[in-house]
Image: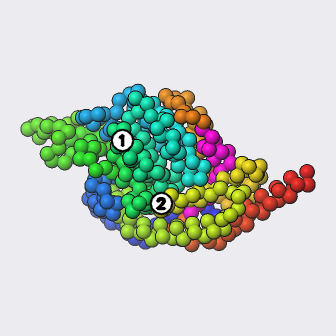
Amino acid sequence: MTYELASSTWGQEELAAIQRVVDSGRFTMGENVRNLEAAFAEKFGCRYAVMVSSGSAANLLATAVLAYKKENPLKPGDEVIVPAISWATTYYPLQQYGLKLRFVDVDLNTLNMDVSQLEKALTPKTRMVMAVSILGNPCALDTMRAFCDKHNLYLFEDNCESMGAMLNGKQCGTFGDVGTYSFFFSHHISTMEGGMFVTENEELYHLARSMRAHGWTRDVPEGSTIFEKKEDDFFEAYRFILPGYNLRPLELSGAVGIEQLKKLDRFIDIRRENARYFKSLFAGDERFITQAENGESSWFAFTLILNPACSIDRASVMEAMKRANINYRIITGGNFLRHDVIKYFNYDCVGEIKNANIAHDQGFFVGNHPYDIRDQIKHFHATLTSAVTQQEKENVCV
């Protein structure tokens, strides 16, 4: 038996959608992308949604529009409070816009930012908090939102790993001034590559529409306040107002996304059923720290940390999993401070970064899927517990 990290979520509906686009001959961003944006905004209860080429592109776009906002824009040297564990492109746009990162440790059980450190992280230069819900598990978005409102800060919600997760009856990804989602292959729904930017703010929406496509005016809604239209239509068709990007998605991705979005609720229901079985197998075993659910997780994957108090050798455990055809990987991107690229950042740390290092050194995750994987989970549990029990016996003998 092989326990894979990820699997395709596509069926005949997605293939038929691709064929319709091929038959139409229109591949660049158009009607399918617009329809997906409208459906996405309605489903997640947000006012505006802008599709882009990836979740990473969505993070770049979200940072960019906050830097070009007319009032209170982000500026080089401004500080952002960030968690020590996330994916690389959570952090890269912040660095690329000259912002200083203040790293906060994570809670070892939820793997999300330890919000008890927020007040300690605050300085006169703090302008934003980066909220990241790790692997489907909602972070303390209610606490972060209240903190940002109290101190007049932006809340940026990177929800690329947690589509469909809920906190207090509200969709994760919609608590922030800006929010982002990813449609990568291994995520809750997939459009090959793709992502979504969401906001309630009209100015940010218009800025996003412009900066997604070269910084021109053509995609900005009529009557926008971010520029004044000139009478020369010849020039207006190719008029550039912002130093934008080309982050446009393809019509193929938009068409696939429409079909995938219809299936999302069912996918998440099955993921949650798998999670209940996973948690039941590991319940009460203090050798393993599994992710504690906050709110309603959409269970991207199943994390496991070998309890450092038990002196378990992770390398031996991984070798046993490899022999058993169980795929595994680092938790998201591990402790970002441990990566070579950190030398290019302006940053500091708020207190000791302890738990992120434990997760980095003693943790890993295995996959979850939108179909029944109880047999694979049972196989994983048996392999893991056998490997750890064997280590314990050998240690006793020594």
Front-lying residue, 314 or 287: 287
Image quadrant in which the N terminus is located? bottom right
At label 2, which amino acid type do we have?
A: Gly
Residue 114 visible in the displayed image: yes
Q: Is residue 350 magenta?
A: no
Queried whether the magenta region covers residue 355, the answer comes back as yes
For disc 1, the marked residue is: 150
The label shown at residue 295 is 2
Question: Which of the two discs, 1 and 2, sits closer to the camera?
Answer: 1
Q: Amino acid at mark 1?
A: Lys
- Residue 55 in view, yes or no: no
| Residue ID at (21%, 45%) | 220
Which secondary structure, mark 2? loop
Q: Is residue 391 left or right of residue 54?
A: right
Left or right relative to 120: residue 279: right
Classify mark 1: helix, strand or loop: helix
| Residue drawn at the location 56% of the way across and 63% of the way down | 368
Q: What span is colored magenta in the figure?
A: 353-368
From this view, report whether residue 290 is shown above or below residue 88.
Answer: below
User: Badge 1: few (under 14), some or many (20 or more) residues near its Cα, within 10 Å?
Assistant: few
Residue lying at 57% horizontally and 58% vertically, measured from the top left: 292
- Number of numbered discs visible in the structure rendering: 2
Residue nearest the viewer, comparing 350 with 356? 350
- Going by the image, does 339 lie left or right of 18? right
Label 2: how many Cα within 10 Å (few below 14, some 14–19, many 20+): some
Q: Whole-percent x and y of residue 43?
A: 33, 63
